[in-house]
Amino acid sequence: MQTLARPVRDWLWMVLLGVGTAATVLFTLGLLSEAVVFPLMGGLSVLCWALGPRLHDIRPRRPWWLLSAAGFFFLTGVVVRGLLADRPYPLAQLGDAFSVCGFGFFIAAMLTFLNRWGMDRRALLDGLIVCIGAAIASTLLFVLPATAIAGRPLLVSVLAGLYPLLDVVVVLLGVNLAFTTAVRQPAFVLLGGMMVLIFAGDLGYAVIGRGGDVNGPRLMTLPFLLAFTLGGAAPLHPSARALGRATPLPIQAWSPARMAVIGPAVAVPFLLEVLLNHQSPLARWILGVGGAAIVALLLVRASDAVQSHAAAQRRFEHQATHDPLTGLPNRRMLALMVERRLSESGPGDVWMFYLDLDGFKLVNDSWGHPVGDRLITEVGGRLRHALPAQATVARVGGDEFVIVQRCTEPEAMAAARRIMECVERPLLLDGAEGATAEVVVGASMGIVRAERHDTAEALMRDADTAMYRAKEEGRNRWTVFDASMRDAVRERVEIEVALRAAVAQEQLSIEYQPIVDLTTDRPAGAEALVRWQHPVRGWIGPNMFIAVAEDANLISALGAWVLRESVRQLARWRAAGVVDEDFWMSVNVSPRQLGDAGFADRLAVTLAQAGVPAGNLVLEITESVMVEGGELTERLLRRLRDMGVRISVDDFGTGFSALGYLRRHPVTGVKIDQSFVGGLGGCVEDEEIVRAVVAMSSALGLSVVAEGVETTAQRDVLAALGVPLAQGWLWGRAVPPDIFAAAWAVPVPHW
Ligand code: C2E
Ligand code: MG
Ligand code: MG
């Protein structure tokens, strides 16, 4: 059936509705007899319930098969009743046997849906309240009068009373279904319409049943005819697929719709008490017991609503104060707990440990976020486990944890060791495609002891400051806060303010240091090094302010200016014949700069405007760019290489220098860090390192520059090791451009 063309499949339900409506109209006008119209529509619906679910691959099939069986029995009931209407008792009642079976299957179908959607406790209670109200009404209004009619066989009376009760069960399930799922799509509406019609039809029969009638006028079967039509169309509608899934309603205690259904049910006993004045003892019992049951259910329902409200409140509070990933308190909760601890007195002092994982970004980037999440969860769990219950362990940021504990100083130091150990222990993590890796991360930690008048906020700030100091000092260590760090922070803020002004007003200058060819002892290039003459503090070195510029987001503007200015300087020297045309300019670029969109485009414009070939520019990047940069940086470096710009790895050997990074990234050279050069001529180890770097570089086709050469001894060792280029105070410090030109201008023959 799924082979039917899509549009045909999607519109079949309309066709069935059309046929059903036409048949109903013809039947109403008397142009079609009951003996024709019921087998036709009933048969069609039974078929639809049996086969329709295949059309849109609706699952599960069971409720629809049950509906189909119910339809079959209802239909047979109608037909048999019609055929045997004039026969004597009990043959005339044979049709009812089929109808009762039909009810059985119908109720089973509804239960299957309910089971599928998950029974909601509150929907069940609401359904029961309505059910009892309906049961009282139907018993007093229909069942008792029908069974009280004298002179009928017992079976006829029982059947007359049974139908209203079966309808009460249908009402119960209908209310339950409506309150259990949020689905309100056409298929659901069609099924709902069917149930309302069946109920209305039965109500009609129940009313005439009070007077002892069993077969009413012919048009009383109209609701059933329409019920077949609507119900049959339901599985043909594409939205019927949603009926197979649980789509719970949002939590709502007493919605207006529920009140509209429950309200009348609650009123039933009171209204009937007033309306029916001649009550038998049985009727009074039914009213009393039924009314009490409704009140009891209402009480259960009300306390249920209050409890679930309280539970939702508790859940909400937990969510607002806890980190969803680790379940640990979050920053807000931590602040409250710290304030409480500070106000309590006890043995020892309050200590705070501010922990930031080192290398977390690397794990996240190379293994993906799910693995990163697992790492955080694992570390959180370990910390919670390793520390005493009275310690607070909180997660305050992506890879930041804070621990607060009241203890003595030796205990605090022991805790610090335990914390570091928790983090450093290798972690086994499952990555994508079942790969497992042993990951080792470290942590930088700031520790602070609360002073007497500290606030939670001040404590966090100081611990954070100490943590940053630990990071600056080389990561994977802890630092205990002292007041001088607060001054350093203040100073840093002052520098930031002044630097902002300096960058805006171009108060910075650039000095140039020669990079010398060891075979000729003459500069083959120069490195541009930025300088800042602070109006009050005097000369401030880049080691201090570049980091500030990076943190304060000033590095892009600063770096762009250095690049522009040094490229222009090179152009001026080239034009004036100070340098030859192979002479290059080395410019430091910070990782942040490389993250700027349009970096390459702006650089191309700078080079073009200055008329400097891209090959005469070397960008010095740090190893961290290659390690932490990711795919975007890799693409940018490739683009720069395509432009012809050279790329050198600065301070080579101090970072994560893995051979893999050098091979993967399109770099053209390395600068051996000064720390290795300093030991040359005395330290054999440094010599071996330089030898290894030279070997590796020549294998990879990279150029090599040695930095920080201060003595002739160092120069000689470098030359002997085969390092072609060097930079250092031996040849000269970085100087302003005019001094550089005066010292190093290419000798012109006619001078
Ligand atoms: P770097 O790129 O490794 O630069 C070399 C540093 O070593 C310079 O320090 C230089 O003056 C110093 N140096 C050169 N020869 C010798 C020597 O023989 N002995 C000793 N002890 N030192 C020597 P400086 O100018 O203080 O720059 C420090 C760092 O600041 C640079 O290290 C670089 O990473 C950064 N930097 C400088 N200018 C810029 C810039 O415009 N942008 C960026 N992003 N960073 C810059
Ligand atoms: Mg450099
Ligand atoms: Mg360097």
Image (cartoon, rainbow, N blue to C red):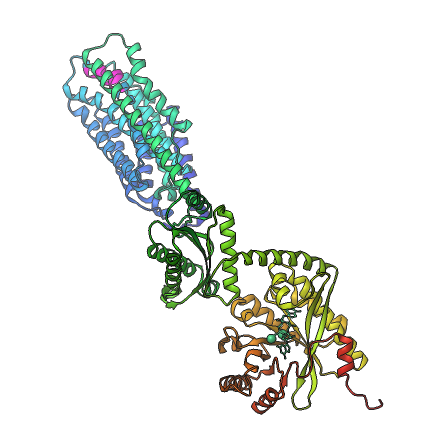
What residue is rendered at 74% in x and 62% in y? 506
Residue 325 placement, left or right of 128: right
Q: Residue furthest right?
A: 750
Judge whether 717 appears above or below 654 on screen. Answer: below
Front one among 232 and 287: 287
Q: Horizontal and vertical percent for residue 37? A: 33, 30
Q: Horizontal and vertical percent for residue 658? A: 49, 76
- Determine which quarter of the picture holds residue 651: bottom right
Q: How many marks?
A: 0
Judge whether 591 appears above or below 64 on screen. Answer: below
Front one among 265 and 528: 528
- Determine which quarter of the picture holds residue 727: bottom right
Front one among 158 and 546: 546
Front one among 610 and 259: 610
Q: Is residue 335 magenta?
A: no
Most frequent secondary structure within the magenta stretch:
helix
The answer to whether residue 485 of the structure is visible from this angle is: yes
Ligand 1: quadrant of the figure: bottom right
Q: Horizontal and vertical percent for residue 748? A: 81, 88
The answer to whether residue 233 of the structure is visible from this angle is: no
Judge whether 575 appears above or below 143 on screen. Answer: below
Q: Horizontal and vertical percent for residue 669? A: 59, 80
Q: Which residues are magenta?
A: 138-147
Residue 159 placement, left or right of 451: left
What residue is rendered at 35% in x and 20% in y? 264
Q: Is residue 140 magenta?
A: yes
Judge whether 650 appears above or below 130 on screen. Answer: below
Residue 512 placement, left or right of 395: right
